[in-house]
Amino acid sequence: MRKGYFGDFGGCFVPELLMPPLMELEQAMAAILPSEAFQSELRSLLKDFAGRETPLTFCPALSQELGFELWLKREDLLHTGAHKINNTLGQALLAKHMGKSALIAETGAGQHGVAAAAAAARLGLRCTIYMGAEDVERQSANVRRIKLLGAAVRPVESGSRTLKDAINAALRAWISEQADTHYCFGTAAGPYPFPDLVREFQSVIGREARAQMLERTGALPDYAVAAVGGGSNAIGMFAPFVEDESVRLIGVEAGGTGEPGCLHSAAINFGRPGVLHGEYTMLLQDEDGQILPSGSISAGLDYPGVGPEHAFLHRSGRVKYGIAYDHEALAAFQKLCRAEGILPALESSHALAWVLEHREEFRPGSRVLVNLSGRGDKDMDIIERALGA
């Protein structure tokens, strides 16, 4: 493949002023990431600060009901409550090795913001988080956590006031602050080399899950399922399984309410190729190429695009991308809470919802692995309002 591309998707379409820090980052990835000093320090942080490795949990009640084995990769048990800490610790440590003194980051559901703030505090870096004003309101608990960890929150009022606009604001800020600041990009998207960098740090999910399934069951899973917004938790799960042809990979996009004309975040299923945030990928856009607003009950999936590697995996046929709707995610959330005593994030609930709604597509007795990318504490206000309604 061409450098920075996955088939036709990827690239680096940014203003000239952003090329120097991106080239500096690419050089640091080549020189610093492979070093034993960096890898040893990162392993220590992931183990002793973040809490890796995360467990693999078998779901006995749901497995009996479904007729196949349901396993969960428990990223919800990590420090800060989601898989995001894998990436923020890696990028923050890389930034420190590069001589940077500050981080900027964007966030949607707030989990990447919390994780970036925690990593910055641990490593002695200043931190500023850009967050859409709409997400500041619906994820107020995470905003409070970010501030307690010592980071500043910058609400973004432009556009749809969600993740897309937070990324725009963070990229603009990076132009003027690049000398001493690293942009800690939160998902497997954006201009090269960010998709590669985020996949590098999130692939620990799939590597662990692969080894754990072999140890616990003596075999690889028959299916691996993960929710897809920008795509970091999913690419982290999928990447170590891509070469295993026996493992079917299923990504799940957010379909919104499912009503005709509703806002949704299913860029792979309903989008078209285009350029956003420095990458050529699948996007929600109108006939004139203008980005359409996205929507989901899950703030972390509320994004009008998807990472370029996911666009490639879809086009190549290696990964199947389905859709789960708001009401299905809410039902799956309640089901996992009551059947197994586990409180999933609304993002992860979409992945579980697809499994529950499409149970007839799974062979009886098969092993189905779902990435539980985060815990649901952050979503309680949203869930209570939705269930109350």
Image (spheres, helix red, strand yellow):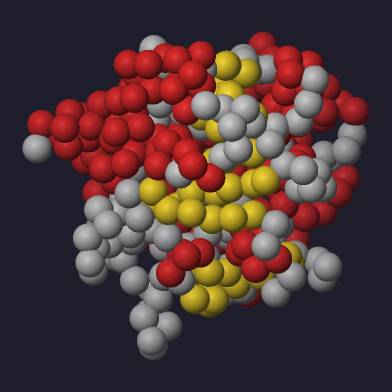
Residue 127: percent from left, percent from top? 49, 36
Query: Which quarter of the figure is the N terminus placed in?
Result: bottom right
Q: Nearer the viewer, residue 48 or 263?
A: 263
Residue lying furthest bottom: 288
As drawn, 338 above or below 246: above
Task: Please indicate, yes or no, whether residue 48 appears anywhere in the rendered image.
Answer: yes
Residue 204 on image: x %, y %: 71, 31
Side of 253 where 5 appears, left or right: right
For residue 363, which quarter of the picture? Answer: top right
- Asked if 221 appears above or below 303 in the picture, the reply is above
Q: Is residue 375 above or below residue 105?
A: above
Question: 347 and 337: which one is in front?
Answer: 337
- Residue at 60% in and 72% down: 280
Q: From where the camera sits, is residue 22 visible?
A: no
Relative image position of residue 216 (x, y in whole percent) = 73, 15
Decide if residue 324 is on the left or right side of residue 243: left
Q: Residue 71: which quarter of the image?
A: top right
Question: Which one is nearer the viewer's eye here, 10 or 297?
Answer: 297
Extreme left residue here?
A: 389
Q: Is residue 345 left or right of residue 296?
A: right
Q: Examine the image and state in which quarter residue 16 appears.
A: bottom right
The image shows residue 24, relative to residue 269, as above or below, that is: above
Question: Is 382 or 41 nearer to us in this picture?
Answer: 382
Residue at 62% from the left image edge and 18% from the top image edge: 56
Looking at the image, which residue is at 53% across and 45% down? 361
Q: Looking at the picture, how far across and down is residue 164, in whole percent?
A: 40, 59
Point out the image quarter for the C terminus: top left
Q: Residue at x 40, y 26 (%)?
A: 344
Q: How many marks?
A: 0
